[in-house]
């Protein structure tokens, strides 16, 4: 298991969810902390309040892209590529995970078995994370 997967599993064992893990890993890579952002990402857990709706890895990935490309304050402008970047992520996710599992909702991906979280979510979170970085870098963002 590589360092990335080890850290991801460590965060999971600390009861962080998919969306939170995605942003925590990126913040750590940037040498930053933002507990408020991580708390806010908690609203996406388990398909938004464990309702089983939209996958937290997908919605968290959209937030990860938005973390860099969306407007964050009065002196900032939203990237003109933001919506296209998120659309690219969603379309990729639909092919990679939506088709095999019959949808992009957490409930579809888990197929009614929460034990699937241990086998399906970690590689999916990792893939979403690196897909987001690829999309951002393809759009001119320099990430460490």
Image (tube, grey):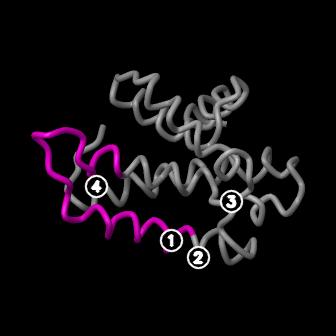
Q: Which residue is mark 3?
A: 53
Q: Which residue is mark 4?
A: 137
Residue nearest the observer in this picture, 57 or 129: 57
Q: Which residue is mark 1?
A: 92
> Is 91 displayed left or right of 110 in the figure?
left
**Residue shown at 34%/44% (left/top)?**
67
State which mark lies toward you, 2 or 4: 2
Q: Which residues are magenta?
A: 66-93
Quarter of the figure that contains the N terminus? top right
- The answer to which image quadrant residue 106 occupies is bottom right
Instruction: Answer with mark 1 or mark 3, whichever residue precedes in sequence.
Output: 3
Are discs 1 and 3 less than 8 Å apart at CB?
Answer: no
Are discs 2 and 1 less than 8 Å apart at CB?
Answer: yes
State which mark lies toward you, 4 or 1: 1
Q: Which residue is mark 2?
A: 95
Instruction: Answer with mark 2 or mark 3, whichever residue precedes in sequence.
Output: 3
> Is 63 displayed left or right of 12 in the figure?
left
- The answer to which image quadrant residue 78 occupies is bottom left
Give me the C-alpha separation between circle 2 and circle 3. 18 Å
**Quick one: SS at disc 3?**
loop
């Amino acid at each position: 298991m590589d360092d990335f997967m080890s850290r991801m599993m460590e965060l999971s064992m600390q009861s962080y969810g998919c969306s939170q893990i995605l942003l925590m890993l990126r913040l750590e890579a940037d040498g930053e902390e933002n507990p408020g952002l991580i708390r806010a990402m908690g609203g996406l857990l388990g398909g938004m309040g464990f309702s089983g709706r939209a996958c937290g890895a997908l919605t968290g990935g959209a937030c990860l892209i938005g973390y860099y490309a969306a407007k964050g304050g009065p002196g900032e402008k939203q990237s003109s590529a933001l919506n296209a970047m998120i659309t690219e992520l969603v379309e990729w996710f639909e092919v990679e995970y939506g088709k095999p599992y019959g949808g992009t909702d957490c409930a579809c991906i888990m197929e009614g078995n929460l034990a699937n979280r241990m086998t399906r979510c970690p590689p999916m979170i990792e893939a979403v994370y690196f897909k987001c970085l690829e999309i951002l870098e393809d759009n001119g963002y320099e990430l460490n």
